[in-house]
Amino acid sequence: MIKTDALIIGAGPTGLFTAHQLKLIGLSCEIVDNLDKIGGQCIELYPDKPIYDIPAIPECTGEELTNNLIEQLKPFNIKFHLSERVEEVKKNNEIWQVKTNKGTEFNTPNIIIAGGVGSFEPRKFSPKECEKFENKSIFYAIKDKTIFKGKTVSIFGGGDSALDWAIELSKDSKVNLIHRRDEFRGAQASVDKMNELAKSDKINLFTKYQLKSVKGKENLEGIEIEHDDKEVKNLETDYVLGFFGLIMQLGPIANWGLNIDKKTISVDTEKFETNQKGIYAVGDICTYPGKLKLILSGFHEGALAARACFKLARPNEKYRFEFTTSSKSIKKRLGVKE
C-alpha cells in the first residue's frame, strides 16, 4: 500500500505541472497513466506538431514541451506508474483507497484527475482492408515525421490536425489533402495557408471526396477516392494519414459518482474540486462556465488544485502562500543554493 498526499491520474502536461506545484508546497505525490510513456496526448498524438500558445515559448513541439516539464520535475524524484489504469476508487473515512488494473494500491486524501479526454482512440477509415496497413503505411497520428520525407502522403480530414500536417509535410513531401466537404473546420489562418499552397501546387487538394479503397499486397501502392457524384480517382501514395478526431471514453471514471457532463467532469473554479470531496479534475477533462481547452488553462487549474490539496493532506497546518523568488523553503526543495 502506497501512502501519498496526492495521486495524479494522467501524465500529460497538466498532470506534470500539477505534480510540480504539489512538490513546491511540500506535498508528496505519485502519477498513474494508462499510456506507456510520459506526455499524454502531446506525445501520443502530436509529438512533432508545433504548439504556439505556451506563454514565453514562441514555438515548441509536444515532445519538447513534455521534455521541459520532465526537466522541471527532476529535483523532486516523482514516482510514475505507467501502463496502469485506475480501476477502483473507494473512500474510507477521509482517505481514498485506489487500486489499479495491475494491483497497485494507494491511500491518499487527494485525487487529481488530469486525464485529458480520458481513454481515447482515433476514428478510423471504413474500408476493412485498411487494417493490414495500419502502423505501416496508414497512420492516425504522427510520431516521427521524418519517415514521410521525399514521399507521397495522402491526408484525410478537415480539421486543424489535417491542415497543420498538410502544411508542415508539404515542405519535404508531395501531399494530397482529401476532405469530404468544401468547408474546413480548422483555424482560418491555416485554411488560408493551405489554399495558398494548393494554388502553387505544393498541395493537391481534393474536396467532396472520401476513401473508397486501398491497393497493395504487402505494401501500400495506392488508393481510390470517390466524389459525392460517384466519380472515382486513383492516387499513387506511399502513406495515408487519417485525422477524423478521437473516440473518447471515460472508462472507470464514469463509475466514481462524479458529476459528468458530456464526458467531462464538472468542477468549481476555486479549487477545481468535483462533487466528491478530495477529488479534483484539471485540464481537458474538466468543465466549468467559460472553460477554455488550452494547455495554459490546465496549468492554472492544476496550480489551484494543488494548493487545495494542502488542507486535506495537512489538516493541522495552515497553508502560507510563498513566491518562488523569495521563499527559502521552496528554494531548498528545488535544490537552489543561497
Image (tube, rainbow, N blue to C red):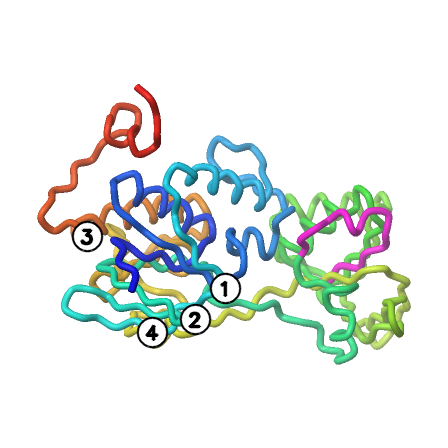
Residue holding disc 3: 313
Disc 3 is placed on an element classified as helix
Could you tell me which residue is drawn at 90 percent across and 62 percent down? 236
Q: Which residue is mark 4?
A: 88
**Circle 2 crowding by C-alpha within 10 Å: few under 14, some 14–19, many from 20:** few
Q: Tell me: 218 left or right of 257.
A: right
| CA separation in Å, label 4 and label 3 | 21 Å
Spatial CA distance of label 2 from label 1 is 9 Å
At label 1, the amino acid type is Ser
Circle 2 residue: 102
Whether 154 is among the magenta residues is yes
Which mark, by number, is residue 83?
1
Type of amino acid at the residue the image marks with label 3: Ala
* Mark closer to the observer (2, 4): 2
- Labelled pair 4, 3 in contact (Cβ < 8 Å): no
At label 4, the amino acid type is Glu
Q: Residue 91: give x, y in percent of width and height.
A: 21, 70
**Residue ranking furthest to the bottom:** 128
Q: Which residues are magenta?
A: 142-156
Q: Position of residue 95 (x, y in %)?
A: 20, 64
**Earlier along the polypeptide chain: callout 1 or callout 4?**
1
Q: Earlier in the sequence, mark 4 or mark 3?
A: 4
Comparing labels 2 and 1, the label whose residue is closer to the camera: 2
**Residue farthest to the left, as pictured:** 316
